Amino acid sequence: MSRRASRKVLVIHCHPSHEGFISTALSQVLTGLGTIGADVLVHDLYREEFVPELSASEHRAHREPGVANELAEYADDLRWCDTLVLVYPTWWSGQPAMLKGWIDRVWACGVAWELPDGAGRLRSRLRNVRRIVVVTSHGSSKLVNSLQGEGGKRTVMRSLRTMCHPLTRTHWLAFYGVDTASSDRRTRFLDALPDRIERIVS
Amino acid sequence: MYAAVVLAHPNPDAFAHELARRAVTGLSAAGHEVELVDLYAIGFRAAMTASEREAYHGDRPILDPVVQRQADLVRSVDALVFVYPTWWSGLPAILKGWLERVMVPGVGFRFDERSGKVRPGLTNVSHLVGISTYGSPRWFVRAVNDNGRRTLLRALRLACGRGTSCRWFAMYGIDTSSTNGRTEFAARVERELSELR
């Protein structure tokens, strides 16, 4: 156990299947978090049947504070955590639609940002978030991902981070070329995850 | 030419819907046949399902007739036009899900059996066009990067043929824009698309 107050960690897991690389990565992440005695909340977006499409009424109210009623818990958990961990596969160079929908709908006005009258730009509201960790797999190589622009990485490291604490640190734990990787390379990445998470979060 | 206009905005009163109509008008004026796909109106589901994920690398990766209809469409068009609001610097979930579920192996790309490398599948598409509205001003979009645009003009562009031309229409600062600014932008979209050959 850490001598400090324990970390409050929100883990967002997004993969339709409960076997394979990403779900193993999730359990390794949880192992690492368990070692340091962190307070952990996990949302498994597929298991919880999260609805990713932002609705017309949400859009009409998007300048008013708050989220749709059914999303209150997601918003509360986001405001509670000091560490946000996203575990997902990178598809088409970004977050899967399911996870993008969580961002579109939960990172709403009054939760992630506000736009005071007369202000020219958004103000961040997630000052509680001091650390963002991404664990993701890419089907293609790092080279192909660079050519495609690493849009998903930028969405997290720049867009999301802007709404968090100004000193928020970001950590990108990515496995490239998962489609063609040897099982050795996969195992090495997965085996190292608990320690890496422990070092980052503790 | 045959063109598909893919629209991803939940609110029929939103400017994006106006832009999609103007895109259709412009393309039709050029003599092209146009199909408008309003993803919210057709009830498109964004999330790839567990069974779709399982079938992804098999012979029949598409399981949903709504998705099949989209796959048939993208394989038959010469121009793909996307109209969407940029949210969190990227595509709205419904459009991201359209890419994930429609652009499966055999449609958007194929795996070369010998090398295992990804090969383009959309060699029929000769024009890729994006029309997007942004809440942020231009400098901010530049600073955080325009990830929706990157996804379409880089990742999806790589799925098209070598000669595919790309065009982008960006309306920045939509929330603070004037009626005049929007009218001019919509007129430009219509005019330039009416010149697409």
Image (cartoon, rainbow, N blue to C red):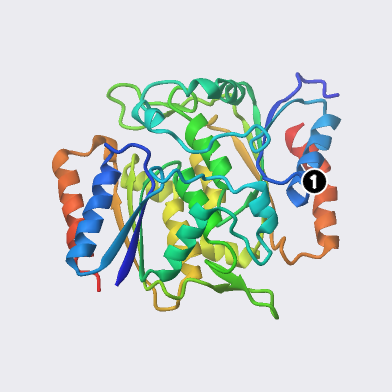
Going by the picture, which residue comes out furthest to the bottom?
B114
The image position of residue A113, as x and y in percent, is: 44, 27
Tell whether A64 sits left or right of B52.
left
- At x 59% / y 34%, what residue is drawn? A50
The image position of residue A70, as x and y in percent, is: 54, 22
The image position of residue A45, as x and y in percent, is: 64, 36
Q: Quadrant of residue A56?
A: top left
- At x 62% / y 41%, what residue is drawn? A170
Residue A161 in view in this figure:
no
- At x 62% / y 34%, what residue is drawn? A49
**B192 to A81, vertically: above or below:** below
User: What is the chain letter for disc 1?
Assistant: A
Q: Nearer the viewer, residue B42 or B14?
A: B42
**A97 to B26, vertically: above or below:** above
The amino acid type of the residue labelled 1 equals: Thr
**B110 to A67, vertically: above or below:** below
**A106 to A194, vertically: above or below:** above
Q: Quadrant of residue A144?
A: bottom right
Q: Residues within 10 Å of mark 1 (few under 14, many from 20)?
A: some
- At x 83% / y 42%, what residue is drawn? A195
Which quarter of the rendered picture does the N terminus of chain A lie within? Answer: top right
The image position of residue A155, as x and y in percent, is: 52, 46
Tell whether A123 sits left or right of A71.
left
Tell whether B123 sits left or right of B48.
left
Going by the picture, which residue comes out furthest to the front?
B65
Secondary structure of residue under mark 1: helix
Residue A146 in view in this figure:
yes
The residue singled out by tag 1 in the image is A24
